[in-house]
Image: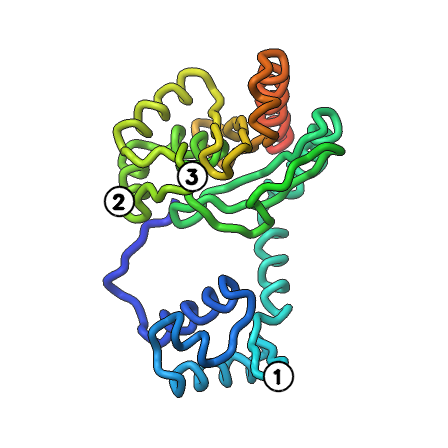
Amino acid sequence: MSEFNTSRTVKTADTVFEIVTALQELDGSTITELADYLGLAKSTVHTYLATLEQKEYVVKDGKTYDLSLKFLDHGTYSKQKNKLTSVAHPILKRTAEETGEVVWLIVEEHGRAVYLDRAKGDRAVQTNGRRGLRTSLHFVAAGKCILANLDEEEVHQILDRHGLPEQTDNTITERRTLLNELQEVRDQGYAYNAGEEVKGVHAVGAPIKQDGTVYGGVSIAGPSARFQDEDYDQKMRKAIVETANTIELNLEY
């Protein structure tokens, strides 16, 4: 996990990335909408957007600005640099075919969960996840597995920085409760997300580790109703642990 220091930042760069993030959150925006959303002057927003458009990082359609496909190039580069993706993808695909559900590969970056890859079975449900999505670790099954395998100081750094935001009524928002659950995850080798990210959707996850270092986690998600069946739950739990173990073996060789 990289260390973070907020005391040395460049305000101009901060504003650029605030605008980029806002354009994605708003699914495209006019100058006025963006200025209101960020609390910036319209002239300031216009100047930044003009620069981003000149550098081909945004596109303009009428009065609406949006992110360009140039970001796809950067994202593809980062993904291809990560050996875990190429090793894990065929294994995720096989697990998705065998279980019929959606299987996710998640890593930690800057204290957040990043959805790196996925494979979908023939009865997979729609979840909030998409490749590249950054979200909190504490309400994602694979994210809990990652947290459980970091040292205590790193966990507290992450929680101090990002807090425990509530995603659904089932999300853990108390630090002590989460720490107790992380101990259970360490003991049993897997974690659950009981409708904590998306109401009505459960997931079970397992960590990907080598030589005591956690590289990421995998999870299988499905309707909460299906997870109420003990046989189904046991099958999904066994499948995700085997998936993680297979990825670990393939990373080694």
| Labelled disc at residue 62 | 1
- Give the Cα distance between marks 1 and 2: 42 Å
Q: Which part of the image, by quadrant, shows the C terminus? A: top right
Residue at image coords 33%, 41%: 164
Residue 143 appears at what percent x and percent y?
45, 36
What residue would you read off at disc 2?
Answer: 160
Q: For residue 41, which quarter of the picture?
A: bottom left
User: How far from the left and from the top, in percent, is residue 86?
Assistant: 66, 42
Between label 1 and label 2, give the one nearer the viewer: 1
Is residue 108 placed above or below 188 in the rendered structure? below
Residues 194 and 158: in front is: 194
Which callout, 1 or 2, points at the residue further toward the start of the chain? 1
Q: Earlier in the sequence, mark 3 or mark 2?
A: 2
Sequence order check, earlier mark of 1 and 3: 1
Give the foreground label among 3 and 2: 3
Secondary element at tag 2:
helix
Amino acid at the residue labelled 1: Gly
What residue is shown with label 3?
168
Instruction: Give the amino acid at mark 3.
Output: Thr
Residue 166 image position (x, y, % from top left): 37, 42
Measured from the top left, where is residue 139 in percent x and y?
A: 43, 36
